[in-house]
Image: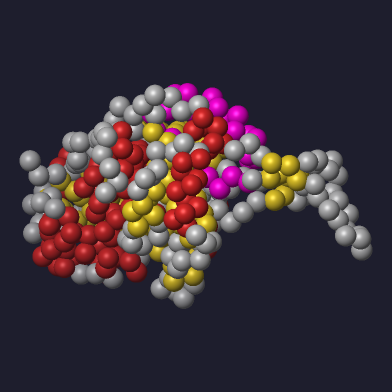
Amino acid sequence: MKKHILIGVTGGIAAYKACDLVSQLKKQDMEVRVMMTSHAAEFVSPLTFTTLSSHPCEVDLFDPSNPDPIAHISLAKWADLVLLIPCTANVLAKVVHGISDDLVTTTFLACTCPKWIAPAMNVHMYENPVTQNNLKLARELGYQIIEPVVGHLACDDTGKGKLADIYTVRDMIVRSFQQEKPLSNKKVLITAGPTQEAIDPVRFISNHSSGKQGYAIAKAAKELGADVTLVSGPVSLPPVDGVHTISVTTALDMFEVMKEEAQKADYIVMAAAVADYRPAKVASDKIKKTKEETQIEMVPNPDILAWIGQHKQENQIVCGFAMETKDLDKNAQEKCIRKNCDLLIANNLKVEGAGFQTDTNVVTLVSKNTLKHLPKCTKEELGFLILRTMKEIEEGKSLC
């Protein structure tokens, strides 16, 4: 039986991208219906969506020509999933506070199916505390948020607020209806982000990790049906819906959490960029600037991945990460063996599209006797690939 997808288009410049999504979902053999706000109809004609969806596009809550006097209820009952795309700051604010003053917001309120929201707006509107509070409330209400991405915006600003890639949205919708959840009986433990090692109450030592890859893996694991715990260093990323997140600051903090949580996990993915060293002493007060040179004595942090490898339980699958700047294959394979990993994800910081802060990655999958070089992909795509590879390793299959 075909799944019913209800698309709500609101009045942002990215409204035209919803046309492609409707077309893509139709190609996936889904029934799609579209409703629009009056402002959205200023950007894209309702006739376009009527043609693409093969269903009348609904705009007016009180349309005298509509034979259905309660279209908002009929649409709500029809839908297996409702998605607001693009969702403006205005409509986001309305739906999380129960305001229903047009067809889109009234229908959204009436829906009992899964509710998804794909925000798209100016970066300053997105980062405004009011919008962030509304997104937090949306998550608390159980709505799935499809995060916007960083990019050049129509207003010529650059920042987070660009609508998520339509093909990514399509794939998320398709996966949400797939019967197979290959990790439904698995507990997956993931680390993400940097650690911060204090020098004094003001300063700390850290690295450029954004946490994006670890969070992408956590999101993929959740979509694949796993019970997911994410141990996160300090990042500026929103929480992943349905994932238990434990926030830590230092390497020692992370080590203590991992010693406890690792005992419960089937799959462990060590994506965090953990500091190798920390100051031997943390000054109780701010270190004052002087003309003299200052030396800070450093001591090694625990090697969490090595500890996990040493204490790996039977049937546990462990995946580590390695960031290199030279001799990638050699160093990564040696690390995989030394740390007793089943899989290691290696990348070269100097390769374009790889490394910290980016939305893409270029990696090599490494086992104790195999190397597999992959082309550039999104961190979301890599998240699924890593987990599927771990599943294959568990089943006794080779990387190749």
- The percent position of residue 51, horizontal first and vertical second, equals 10, 65
Q: Residue at x 33, y 66 (%)?
A: 14
- The percent position of residue 12, horizontal first and vertical second, equals 35, 65
From where the camera sits, is residue 380 visible? no
- The percent position of residue 49, horizontal first and vertical second, equals 17, 63
Q: Residue at x 42, y 36 (%)?
A: 318
Choose top left, top right, bottom left or bottom right for residue 373.
Answer: bottom left
Q: Residue at x 36, y 52 (%)?
A: 371
Q: Observer-nearest residue: 267 or 210? A: 267
Q: Residue at x 44, y 38 (%)?
A: 341
Answer with left or right where residue 249 lies relative to residue 245.
right
Answer with left or right where residue 318 lies relative to residue 196.
left
* Quadrant position of the N terminus in the picture: top left
Image position of 147 with respect to 3: above or below? below
Query: What's drawn in magenta, residue-wise?
Result: 249-275
From where the camera sits, is residue 263 visible? yes
Question: How is colour applied across the structure in the image?
Answer: secondary structure
Q: Observer-nearest residue: 389 or 247? A: 389
Image position of 138 with respect to 23: above or below? above
174 part of magenta stretch? no
262 part of magenta stretch? yes
Residue lying farthest to the bottom in this orientation: 156
